[in-house]
Image (cartoon, coloured by chain):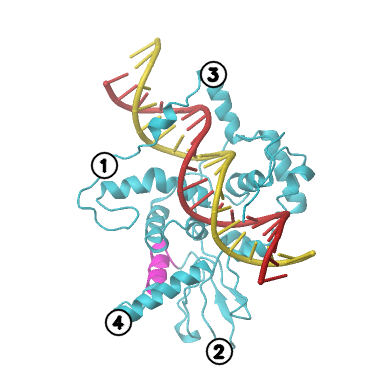
Chain colours: A cyan, B yellow, C red
Amino acid sequence: MGRAPCCSKVGLHRGPWTPREDTLLTKYIEAHGEGHWRSMPKKAGLLRCGKSCRLRWMNYLRPDIKRGNITPDEDDLIVRLHSLLGNRWSLIAGRLPGRTDNEIKNYWNTHLSKKLRSQGTDPSTHKKLSEPVVKENKRRIKNQKTKNNMNKKEMAVKNKNKTGQHVEPLKPKVHLPKPTRVTSFLSLPRNDSFTSSTTSTTTTSSQDLKGGGGAFGVNENDQVLVHPWANGVVFCVSDDQDQVPNSADDHTLENLYEEYLQALLKTDHHHDHQNQLELDSFAESLLI
DNA sequence: AAGCGTAGCAACCGCGTCGGA
DNA sequence: GTCCGACGCGGTTGCTACGCT
């Protein structure tokens, strides 16, 4: 089935957001909450399409967004999660509170893929390359052809407006969400966004719940412990074997990853065929 | 100093999926 | 069961900053 563009381009602003637009969007969402992106621009007095508003909010204006450099721990976790999940940026971002999928995707494309290549690892397969590739980036040549004639002063002004606000680099503080009890396996939320599942400041729409997953274990009351950062991986099969970290103080990112990996590959030493089936099943669970 | 090439990242685009009518 | 609006995701593009020659 054909699909119409998300919005009419006629009369709508495009390109970098102005501080005024940011303010309008922020105030509207603070007053009315997220969601209803399609109708939001009009109600908020913005000449933007809903998609653009959503993107701006999700990737830049959200109050819980963590700005600043990716830490080595985060860096390492991204690489490892990518080896498990592939280019599922939203899932990876869901494990890095305060980071957005766009940010992680950009970071991967600009830093990590090159870093892995320089280390002799294929960034897409995470397997060793026969020859390390140091240089890449073919597309830039094309971009040069599109460069305009704007002078330095104009460029500086435009770039300043691009972000609309000064952002202090913050030292990221990685923390884990607490488990959430739900009563049914079938009702497990699948939520990419850690924040939307662990805070009450924003409304969680049904669409929000479609996106992610949670680590869960079944207790004797047939309840489930959900960890939004673990996306469907079973961590606790009984109360006695509860390996779920309760706070960031208890576990480092390394431990988090190890548990994640162990749960994922817990049958690693069993039959390959069975193991593959379980991995396939896990992969499917990510897609549900 | 000027031009060129690259890095970095915000924003856009198109498609897939979900859920209600 | 079908249609369609809305949303979310991943890939890609556009633009500025900056380093190198």
Distance, label 3 to label 4, CA atoms, is 65 Å
* Callout 1: chain: A
Residue sitting at x 42%, y 69%: A260
Q: Which residues are magenta?
A: A251-262
Horizontal side, residue A261 vs residue C3: left or right: left
- Quadrant of the image occupied by residue A20: top right
Residue A199 shows in the view: no
Secondary structure beneath label 3 = helix
Q: Are marks 3 and 1 on the same chain?
A: yes
Residue under circle 2?
A220
Instruction: Name the main secondary structure of what is drawn in magenta.
Output: helix
* First in residue order: circle 1 vs circle 2: 1
Q: Tag 2: residue type?
A: Glu
Q: Residues within 10 Å of mark 4 (few under 14, many from 20)?
A: few
Residue at mark 1: A134
Q: Are marks 1 and 4 in contact (CB under 8 Å)?
A: no
Q: Is residue A180 above or below residue A71?
A: below
Q: Going from the N terminus, do you reach mark 1 or mark 4 first?
A: 1
**CA gap, disc 2 to disc 4?**
29 Å
> Is residue A142 placed above or below A52 in the rendered structure?
above
Q: Nearer the viewer, mark 2 or mark 4?
A: 4
Tell me the residue that label 4 is attached to.
Answer: A271
* Residue A52 appears anywhere in the view: yes
Q: Quadrant of the N terminus of chain A?
A: bottom right
The chain containing the residue under callout 3 comes to: A
